[in-house]
Image (cartoon, rainbow, N blue to C red):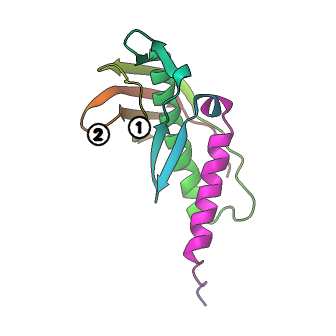
Amino acid sequence: MSRRPEPVQVVKQRRDDTLQQLVSGVPYIQFLGIQIDRRGDELTAVLPFADKLIGNPMLPAIHGGVTAAFLEVTAIIELSWAMVWEDMEAGKFNDTAPRIKFPKTIDFTVDYLRSGLPRDAYARARVNRSGRRFASVHVEAWQDNRSRLFAQGTGHFLMPQRDG
């Protein structure tokens, strides 16, 4: 006898709760105010503008370190979400939240393409390769127009040991 599918609200709530747990596990994400918007399995990171993010008040422009951190956080959350997603969809945990182990950054390169203006920023990461030990991720950040990136980055990560 096949198992009856769960109601869509239950599935969505479990996914949202799991993502929230993932994001809340990193205090720096809260400090910067980064939010993660989920549509299905696709994540978009949102960096709402705040005065504390400005590095050069004469331009004004978002601080380069904030931009780099935003890109790196987006890459790490995307990688972690991909690992959690597999387990979540396979039913490996239902009521109990997973113990999340984050990938460790080996290196991260940022290309600053233009100044980050004093407004909200968005980023999406694409996992180029993810193996048992290493992963490679590309991230793009934009503000008003997705085709006009203000920064992009590429990172290599050491993947955590998987349970089971």
Sequence-wise, the earlier of marks 1 and 2 is: 1
| Label disc, if present, on residue 122 of the rendered structure | 1
Q: Looking at the image, is 106 positioned above or below residue 35? A: above
Q: Residue at x 59, y 84 (%)?
A: 4
Q: Quadrant of residue 44?
A: top left
Q: Quadrant of residue 14?
A: bottom right
Relative image position of residue 75 (x, y in whole percent): 48, 35
Dot 2 amino acid type = Arg
Relative image position of residue 120 (x, y in whole percent): 43, 34
Q: What's the magenta region?
A: 3-29
Dot 1 amino acid type = Tyr
Residue 163 included in the magenta stretch of the image: no
Q: Looking at the image, is 116 positioned above or below residue 35? A: above
Q: Residue at x 41, y 30 (%)?
A: 119
Q: Residue 41: in sight, yes or no?
A: yes
| Label disc, if present, on residue 146 of the rendered structure | 2
C-alpha gap between disc 1 and disc 2: 9 Å
Decide: few, some or many residues near mark 2? Use Cα within 10 Å; few <14, some 14-19, many ≥20: few
Q: Quadrant of residue 29?
A: top right
Q: Looking at the image, is 81 positioned above or below residue 12? A: above
For residue 161, side relative to residue 96 (left or right): left
Q: Nearer the viewer, residue 120 or 27?
A: 120
Is the stretch drawn in magenta largely helix, strand or loop?
A: helix
For residue 152, side relative to residue 108 (left or right): left
For residue 17, side relative to residue 50 (left or right): right
Relative image position of residue 138 (x, y in whole percent): 38, 33
Q: Nearer the viewer, residue 133 or 41?
A: 41
Q: Residue at x 45, y 11 (%)?
A: 57
Dot 1 and dot 2 residues touching (CB under 8 Å): yes
